[in-house]
Amino acid sequence: MDYLEQYQKEFEKYDQMDHDFIDDEKIWKQLRAAENPTKEQVRAVLKKAEKTVRLDPEETAILLQNKDPETLEEMFALAHKLKQEVYGDRIVFFAPLYISDECANDCKYCGFRSSNHMMERKTLSMEQIDEEVRTMIKEGQKRTVLVYGESPHTGIDFLCKSVKRVYSVKEGNGEIRRANINAAPLSVDELRQLKEVGIGTFQVFQETYHHETYQRLHPKGTVKGNYRWRLYAMDRCLEAGLGDVGIGALFGLYDWRFEVMGLLYHTMHLEKMFNGIGPHTISFPRITPATGTPFSDHPEYAVSDEDFKKLVAVIRLSVPYTGMICTARESKEVRNAVLPLGVSQIDGGTRIGVGGYGRHDANALPDKEQFSLGDTRSLNDVVRETGEMGNIPSFCTACYRAGRVGEEFMGFAKSKFVHHFCIPNAIFTFKEYLLDYADEKTREEGEKIIAQHVEQFKNEPVYAKIQDYLQRLENGERDLRV
Ligand code: SAM
Ligand code: SF4
């Protein structure tokens, strides 16, 4: 049976539906109705957003359509405030690990697409995975997202085997404590197998929510050519018991305002179907140039930096309890500009070539990469500079390891309880990083950053425990958490 045939049966269910939860016309109607909103309209939406509740599409449309500089500043300020309220000063760090660039699909924008003959193809062997993971651990990584093309060579057995392999590697004081996945949509049975091997978040980006554009960019006769198979990928994850799901859109394929509305409708759909569980994270990558991929050089709907800032703020305001990921596709300057607007996770020390962590010339090997990186700083530098901006760099995986995912995690986030254990745990993982991996300059700066953040607990019972744990980490203990 060929690879596509294997999924044909699964597609039937979706092909028979007379509609899905993305109504293109309705979204455009809502966007048009919100054109040139008054200051009063924008402020009325902000007043509701202040209560940290999810906004309705009509309200989000007003924020998306706002061009008034004064109320735009108010939007940015509130987005920052909500981020602080829900997540505190934490920024969670991870790094992607590209396992395979073999792909049977032909997405017009991607360097891995099957018709790109300029790309050298590679799938890591188990021994090569060990090597890559060892290098990542030595740099201080604790969380990763494993990235795969979609190919019969990297089916479910390979996925499970590679996840187990990543978790099995130990190096010095370190190990990968959470492996998320960014791979093709899978069936419920396959997803159950991934749950068994202990993955963190399963991410699938819809790329574009606009039906016609999706069809144009993803040829028929490929698995990815089926819009609904992808659109309902997260439903299948939640059905399979994977509590943390990550959605996203690839900005530049279609109008950015439409895509934000798509992300919102996706969130609402999941909340409705799964007892209030929305996505754990939202990603909002912009297309960056990829070798042998002319489409990616000048995307028709390229998003300006100004609009990018706006879309980050609108997502934060509309879905205040969802994690937001900004990757190293963006430059350092852009990342620093959007961090305060609601981002909760970034990558650092990123290599996107398959086998890239073991090579010094990585990130300069276009024939081995899916796209080009905007931020090539080392993990050490991103950690220090992010900390200097007033954040606590965190490598924390406590929730996932304590089984707090999905509904349970949302419950914690919603009650703002997050502050009472997430911030101390973030501080402990930052301390571990400083002790084991940072250079002298980062360690010195980092200790000052920790001291400032610990101050906020001065009058709380947990203060003594934080001091005690910090001392125990100094004395050589590891992996402490409240
Ligand atoms: N193959 C799987 C899939 O398509 O779902 C997952 C891995 S794919 C390598 C991860 C994501 O990279 C895609 O979902 C897409 O959003 C993004 N991507 C593809 N081409 C890109 C480009 N030129 N610039 C930035 N991101 C890109
Ligand atoms: Fe393959 Fe994913 Fe790239 Fe599409 S985006 S060509 S499915 S790796």
Image: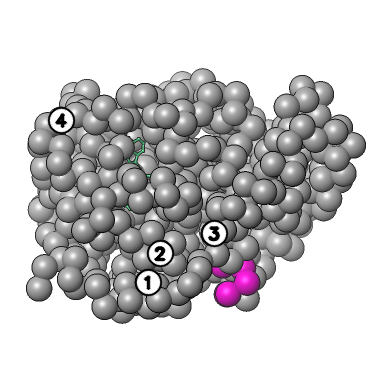
Assign the N terminus to one quadrant of the image. bottom left
Q: Are marks 3 and 1 in contact (CB under 8 Å)?
A: no
Q: Main secondary structure of the magenta part?
A: helix
- The residue positioned 10% from the left and 36% from the top of the image is 117
- Binning the other alpha carbons within 10 Å of mark 4 as few (below 14), some (14 to 19) or many (20 upward) gives some
Label 1 within 8 A of ligand 2 by Cβ: no
Q: Tell me the number on the disc at residue 15.
A: 1
Q: Given this view, does label 4 or label 3 mark the residue nearer the observer?
A: 3
Q: Label 3 is placed on what type of residue? A: Ile
Tell me the CA gap for discs 1 and 4: 37 Å
Q: Are marks 2 and 1 in contact (CB under 8 Å)?
A: yes
Q: Ligand 1 quadrant?
A: top left
Residue 149 visible? The answer is no
**Residue pointed to by mark 2:** 228
Q: Nearer the viewer, residue 475 or 213?
A: 213
Where does the image place residue 361, in percent across and percent down from the top left? 18, 24
Assign the C terminus to one quadrant of the image. bottom right
Where does the image place residue 250, in percent across and percent down from the top left? 43, 42
Q: Quadrant of residue 79?
A: top right
Q: Label 1 is placed on what type of residue? A: Asp
Where does the image place residue 325, in percent across and percent down from the top left? 50, 43
Q: Label 2 is placed on what type of residue? A: Arg
- The residue positioned 36% from the left and 42% from the top of the image is 95
Q: Secondary structure beneath disc 3?
A: loop
Tell me the CA gap for discs 4 and 2: 32 Å
Q: Quadrant of residue 181?
A: bottom left
**Extent of the magenta region:** 270-274
Q: Nearer the viewer, residue 70 or 390?
A: 70
Tell me the CA gap for discs 3 and 1: 15 Å
Q: Tell me the number on the disc at residue 22.
A: 3
Where does the image place residue 43, in percent across and percent down from the top left? 86, 39
